Image (cartoon, rainbow, N blue to C red):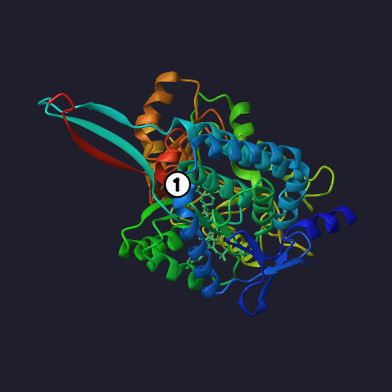
């Protein structure tokens, strides 16, 4: 416990604006809770509207100089941040476990994932390039150049707070943009600690500004109306994303929106069942199901469904549930009481409509906000769990008879983030790539995220891509210049 207290004491508790840590307007603070105990672990500054505007002032003031910084310098800073994050990986992992509840092993994986974006975009920065060529008549020369979009507002969720922060900060800085980041109210500590590393590395004042707040809407709204802000990058729920898109439309802001999901997980009758079960465990129970990429609807061929549900129920009952810092814990708490109530409602609704309960089904008594890993089958049409993002440890199995029906069921949602397909038939796997309406697909794998991939969704799951060669272009704008023929 002492090392947790020492670590928490190292995390800054202020706003970071213009290169200075400082308290919020009028000294307001907000408490950060450990969801495994329900106790408040630290107070951090609670920014007001005026603090948000001060952060944008700083980002705007630093914008021209940062845009003029050499690509090599940007790359070195990000590489330095990667190296420092590796050195301090255990501290970051513990902090993530304290603020989100996820088991330490999963927190370590999130730290590695977060670092990958720093390394990836340190390597992408020097690759920002343009084009040069003749126009068709030969009377001119076309010069196509790339420029940073300008000051950005980055808004991140609590489920992967460090991963989502570096997935936005790294490409923004690589492209030459300054940022104001608003971390999640429920889990702001890893972002504050990460920004203190950037400060240690000599990050110029105003390039990254952090505002923690309990009034997300009040702080972000004036920034979205301010003509100095040029981009919004948001990761969070679809309803909040839609509201922010409406606000961003006024200033015709560039937007990247990583929104909610309702991922289908299809198991065909020719699947390797062992592999499918292993993939399902990862796709469903990682971060207690609190992932945008979590498998939400298990669509299993009727010939395998009983065996699939039976095996997963066995695993669900055997999981060790507890505080993520404790040895051997595989499943942590949900983020808060509201999440427990929502998951319970979805399970109760499904059971009331005729679903069969194989394991779990109810919250686990506190302290902490735990829900028992749950497996349901025989889901009936109309069950809310088939429409809603569950965001909890509930695996719900429906059945299908043929490929067309599986595709219809999988695509029957407004979301389109990711799908998972298990089949040993290559042609069928390829058909699924063409038929499933999702921005990403796992073919015989249960986790798809990595820094080298263009992460993002179709339909109501979002706009734009984070990571991959595509990721940096979200923070760049193109200019075309026609220059007179230099030989004329
Ligand atoms: P959320 O409630 O939409 O919040 C996301 C962020 O938006 C938080 O920082 C939140 O601040 C802020 N926010 C809330 N209302 C706002 C408003 N009116 N104006 C400006 N900002 C506002 O989502 P969440 O519960 O944190 O995260 C879970 C959701 O994120 C799920 O739907 C999940 O699928 C999605 N997600 C998507 C991806 C992806 O890459 N597609 C990745 C991870 C998560 P507060 O914390 O202060 O409320």
**Where is residue 104, by image quadrant?**
top right
Q: Residue 166's spot in the image, x, y percent?
A: 58, 46
Q: Nearest the camera: 58 or 35?
A: 58
Q: Is residue 448 visible?
A: no
How far across and down, in percent of the image, does residue 5 sit? 84, 59
Vertical comparison of 465 with 44: above or below? above
> As displayed, is residue 7 above or below residue 266?
below
**Which residue is drawn at the image coordinates 16% and 24% (left, top)?**
487
Q: Quadrant of the N terminus?
A: bottom right
For the view shown, which residue lies furthest in the right direction? 2
> Is label 1 in a helix, a strand or a loop?
helix
Percent x, y of residue 12: 72, 60
Q: Residue at x 25, y 39 (%)?
A: 480
137 w.r.t. 354: above or below: above
Residue 307 lies, in percent from the top left, at 61, 34
Q: Nearer the viewer, residue 123 or 69?
A: 69
Q: Observer-nearest residue: 317 or 211?
A: 211
View extreme (left): residue: 137
Taking the spot 46% from the left edge, 59% from the top edge, the residue there is: 60
Q: For this view, does 136 lie left or right of residue 389? A: left
The residue that mark 1 highlights is 67
Neighbourhood count class around disc 1 (C-alpha, 10 Å): few under 14, some 14–19, many 20 upward: many
Whether residue 30 appears in this view of the structure is yes
Residue 283 relative to residue 151: left or right = right
Number of residue marks: 1
Ligand 1 within 8 angstroms of badge 1 C-beta: no
Quarter of the rendering occupied by the C terminus = top left
């Amino acid at each position: 416990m002492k090392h947790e207290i020492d670590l928490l004491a190292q995390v800054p508790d202020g706003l970071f604006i213009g290169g200075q840590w400082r308290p919020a307007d009028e000294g307001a603070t907000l408490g950060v809770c450990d969801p495994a105990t329900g106790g408040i672990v630290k107070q951090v500054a609670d920014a007001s509207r005026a603090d948000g505007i001060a952060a944008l002032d700083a980002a705007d003031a630093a914008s021209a100089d940062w845009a003029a910084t050499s690509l090599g310098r940007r790359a070195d800073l990000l590489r330095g941040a990667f190296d420092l994050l590796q050195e301090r990986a255990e501290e970051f992992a513990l902090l993530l476990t304290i603020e989100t509840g996820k088991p330490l092993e999963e927190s370590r994986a999130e730290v590695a994932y977060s670092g990958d974006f720093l390394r990836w975009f340190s390597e992408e920065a020097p690759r920002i390039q343009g084009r040069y060529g003749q126009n068709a008549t030969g009377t001119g020369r076309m010069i196509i150049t790339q420029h940073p979009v300008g000051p950005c507002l980055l808004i991140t969720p609590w489920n992967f707070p460090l991963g989502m922060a570096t997935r936005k900060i790294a490409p923004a800085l690589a492209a030459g943009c300054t940022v104001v980041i608003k971390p999640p109210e429920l889990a702001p500590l890893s972002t504050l600690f990460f920004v203190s590393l950037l400060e240690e590395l000599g990050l110029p004042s105003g390039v990254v500004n952090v505002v923690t707040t309990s009034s997300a809407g009040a702080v972000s709204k004036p920034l979205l109306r301010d003509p100095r802000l040029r981009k919004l990058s948001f990761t969070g729920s679809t309803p909040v994303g839609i509201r922010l898109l409406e606000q961003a439309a006024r200033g015709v802001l560039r937007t990247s929106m990583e929104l909610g999901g309702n991922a289908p997980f299809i198991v065909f009758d020719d699947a390797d069942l062992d592999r499918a079960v292993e993939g399902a465990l990862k796709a469903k129970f990682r971060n207690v199901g609190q992932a945008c990429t979590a498998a939400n609807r298990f669509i299993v061929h009727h010939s395998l469904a009983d065996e699939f549900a039976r095996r997963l129920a066995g695993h669900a009952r055997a999981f060790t549930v507890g505080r993520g810092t404790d040895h051997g814990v595989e499943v942590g708490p949900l983020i808060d009481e509201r999440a427990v109530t929502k998951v319970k409602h979805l399970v109760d609704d499904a059971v009331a409509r005729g679903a069969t309960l194989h394991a779990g089904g109810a919250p686990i008594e506190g302290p902490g906000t735990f829900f028992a890993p749950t497996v349901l089958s025989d889901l009936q049409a109309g069950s809310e769990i088939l429409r809603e993002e569950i965001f909890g440890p509930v695996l719900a199995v429906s059945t299908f008879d043929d490929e067309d029906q599986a595709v219809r069921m999988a695509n029957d949602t407004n979301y389109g983030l990711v799908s998972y397909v298990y089949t040993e038939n290559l042609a069928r796997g390829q058909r699924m790539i063409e038929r499933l309406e999702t921005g990403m697909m796992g073919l015989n794998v249960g986790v798809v995220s990595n820094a080298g991939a263009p992460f993002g969704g179709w339909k109501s799951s979002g706009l734009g891509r984070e990571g991959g060669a595509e990721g940096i272009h979200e923070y760049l704008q193109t200019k075309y210049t026609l220059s007179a023929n230099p030989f004329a």
